Amino acid sequence: MIISIASGKGGTGKTTVAVNLALSMDTQVQFLDCDVEEPNAHLFLHPVLNEPKIVTTPVPWIDENRCNLCGKCAEICQFKAIVVIGKTVLPFHELCHSCGGCMEVCPEKAITETGRELGLIERGHRNGLEFVHGRLRVGEAMSPPLIKEVRSYTRPDILTIIDAPPGTSCPVIASMNGADFVLLVTEPTPFGLYDLKLAVGAVKILGIPCGLIINRSDMGDDKVKAYAKQEDLPILMEIPFDRRIAEAYSRGEILVEVMPEWKEKFKTLFRRIQGIVSGRTG
Ligand code: SF4
Ligand code: SF4
């Protein structure tokens, strides 16, 4: 099963939930940190990491001796990533989406592939937990290809927990697509509710069952709960504001290790998710 843990808004406790759920399981688990712009699960899990692997994406390289300046490559590019200026064809690699269109249409076969570095993949383990995360290169704008690379390590035979980036844009979709369940972590504030509605809209388009975790549930107002009722979204766990939880987080400690009574709550959370997923597939 693949559980993707997301949140419309940053700072809701998404990584805390993902890490604690992973460490509460008695079975083998794989943890994929797909928040490649700012991966932080390793700061809590402290996995032993192997050699990093550099990930690249193909971008065009022009052979000026072959090019006849026909402009067909610039015409087909929807991203203005290749232009003909005077007697030069200029590719802008940072804008290129690696669709390969320019290479296909070039009548002179003047375009070949070179690589643009997207970032790194690091794999490792913490006891029995398999760990993979991506680190987007500083300055790189396109994270979905790197997220897809992280997800390519998904093992179908064990539980996979994905820590998705915050928000509702392409990187989040790349982290949720194909999951069996999306767990949305939110907080009972107007900002939390606003971003939750956007996240629920995205999950509904993907057709994936989802449920909520309300963090700092005893603060704010009841509007998130009213919204959940209206949309028939199960609230699978509530985490109250607790100074001990906040202190553990600020020290990079893991909740289920500092307060072991939470382990059973995360196991119950998983059983509830299993029930929803199996009810749906059944
Ligand atoms: S590969 Fe696609 S996006 Fe990149 S320059 Fe060529 S046509 Fe444009
Ligand atoms: S399509 Fe090929 S030949 Fe035409 S301008 Fe582009 S690189 Fe040159």
Image: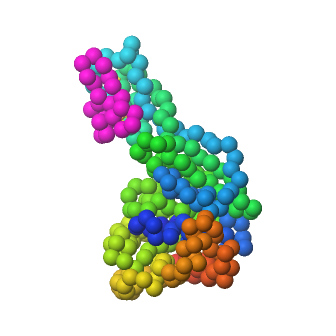
Instruction: Residue 152: give x, y in percent of width and height.
Output: 58, 51
Tell whether position 41 is magenta.
Answer: no
**Farthest-out residue, left:** 86
Q: Residue at x 62, y 41 (%)?
A: 53
- Which picture quadrant has residue 197? bottom left
- Image coordinates of residue 63 in percent, x first then y, are 41, 18
Q: How many labels were placed on the picture?
A: 0
Classify 260 as above or below 204. Answer: below
Q: In this view, does 205 lie above or below 154?
A: below
Instruction: Answer yes or no: is residue 2 visible.
Output: no
Q: In which quarter of the image is residue 39?
A: bottom right
The residue under the point 26% across, 22% down is 85
**Residue 77 percent location from the top left of the image:** 31, 36
Q: Where is residue 7 in the image (x, y as percent from the top left)?
A: 44, 68
Q: Would residue 44 be seen by someone viewing this image from the given angle?
A: yes
Where is the C terminus found, in terms of image quarters? bottom right
Side (left or right) of 133 relative to 116: right
Of the 4 image quadrants, the one containing the N terminus is bottom right
Which residues make up the magenta segment?
Answer: 74-95
Q: Which residue is drawn at 32% across and 23% down?
A: 89
The scheme the figure's colours follow is: rainbow
Viewer-side residue, 274 vs 257: 257
Name the residue rendered at 63%, 68% in the picture: 253
Q: Nearer the viewer, residue 66 or 116?
A: 116
Taking the view exactly as shown, the residue that stands out farthest to the right is 127
Left or right relative to 121: residue 200: left
Q: In which quarter of the view is residue 187 placed?
A: bottom left
